[in-house]
Image: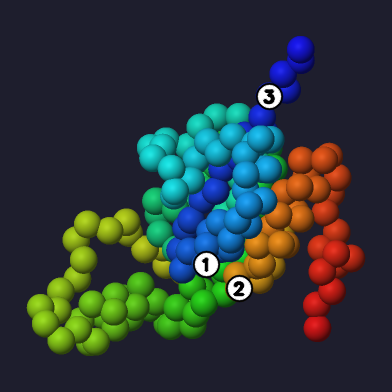
């Protein structure tokens, strides 16, 4: 009997709302079928401390907003064969990059979030990763192999994309899911 190795899949959540991961989980019973073909090797829903080597497919949700995410994204790209930007924050920066319109975005964002709008004990955070001067979409930092748009993308779209790649085909989002 020949046992085929499962495809190593990772999901990563950077700066965003986690809606894309909720859509990933909304695949419901289709996840059971996927689990026969994939091994989830890294995810916010798994207790894995370091991003592994030789990952076949990584789905990344969210924009890059701090130094920790920037360095993690570089490591992920080095260790991943197929990198997929999952959702509008990863694809375009979306809401996360709205802070880029401020002249001194880091100072103004921290001031607004932790001082001006706080009722009790306003203070700057001390144990969070340092914000980058601006937020970036994934492709502004590393090469992206495939994009799944949506805020969040539907579970059906996510399932279609991963299933097509597992079958050795490049998904055609335009053909499968007509927009507008």
First reached walking from the N terminus: tag 3 or tag 2? 3
Q: Are marks 2 and 1 in contact (CB under 8 Å)?
A: yes
Looking at the rendering, which quadrant does residue 139 occupy?
bottom right
Residue 174 picture location, percent across and down = 85, 67
Horizontal relation, residue 49 to residue 12: left or right: left
Residue 19 disc label: 1
Horizontal relation, residue 108 to residue 93: left or right: left
Marker count (numbered): 3
Alpha-carbon distance for marks 3 and 2? 33 Å
Residue 5 disc label: 3
Alpha-carbon distance for marks 2 and 1? 7 Å
Q: Nearer the viewer, residue 164 or 79?
A: 164
Looking at the rendering, which quadrant does residue 107 occupy?
bottom left
Residue 90 seen by the camera? no
Q: Quadrant of the C terminus?
A: bottom right
Work out whether 35 lies above or below 127: above
**Which of the colour schemes (rainbow, by chain, secondary structure, one colour) is used?**
rainbow
First reached walking from the N terminus: tag 1 or tag 3? 3
Residue 144 picture location, percent across and down = 68, 52
Helix, strand or loop for disc 1: helix
Q: Nearer the viewer, residue 103 or 24?
A: 24
Residue 151 disc label: 2
Work out whether 128 lies above or below 32: below
Residue 83 picture location, percent across and down = 66, 47
Q: Are marks 1 and 3 in contact (CB under 8 Å)?
A: no
Residue farthest top in this picture = 1
Q: Nearer the viewer, residue 152 or 145?
A: 152
Q: Residues within 10 Å of mark 2 (few under 14, many from 20)?
A: some
Q: Nearer the viewer, mark 3 or mark 2?
A: 3
């Amino acid at each position: 009997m020949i046992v085929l190795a499962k495809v190593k899949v990772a999901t990563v959540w950077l700066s965003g709302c986690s809606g894309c991961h909720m859509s990933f989980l909304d695949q419901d019973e289709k996840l059971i079928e996927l689990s026969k073909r994939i091994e989830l090797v890294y995810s916010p829903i798994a207790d894995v401390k370091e991003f592994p080597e030789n990952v076949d497919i990584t789905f990344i949700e969210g924009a890059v907003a701090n130094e920790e995410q920037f360095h993690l994204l570089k490591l992920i790209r080095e260790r991943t064969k197929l990198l997929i930007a999952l959702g509008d924050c990863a694809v375009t920066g979306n809401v996360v990059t709205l802070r880029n319109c401020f002249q001194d975005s880091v100072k103004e964002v921290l001031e607004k979030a932790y001082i001006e709008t706080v009722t009790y004990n306003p203070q700057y955070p001390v144990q969070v990763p340092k914000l980058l001067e601006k937020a970036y979409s994934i492709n502004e930092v590393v090469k992206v192999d495939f994009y799944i748009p949506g805020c969040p993308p539907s579970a059906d779209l996510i399932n279609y994309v991963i299933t097509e790649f597992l079958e050795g085909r490049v998904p055609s989002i335009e053909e499968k899911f007509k927009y507008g």
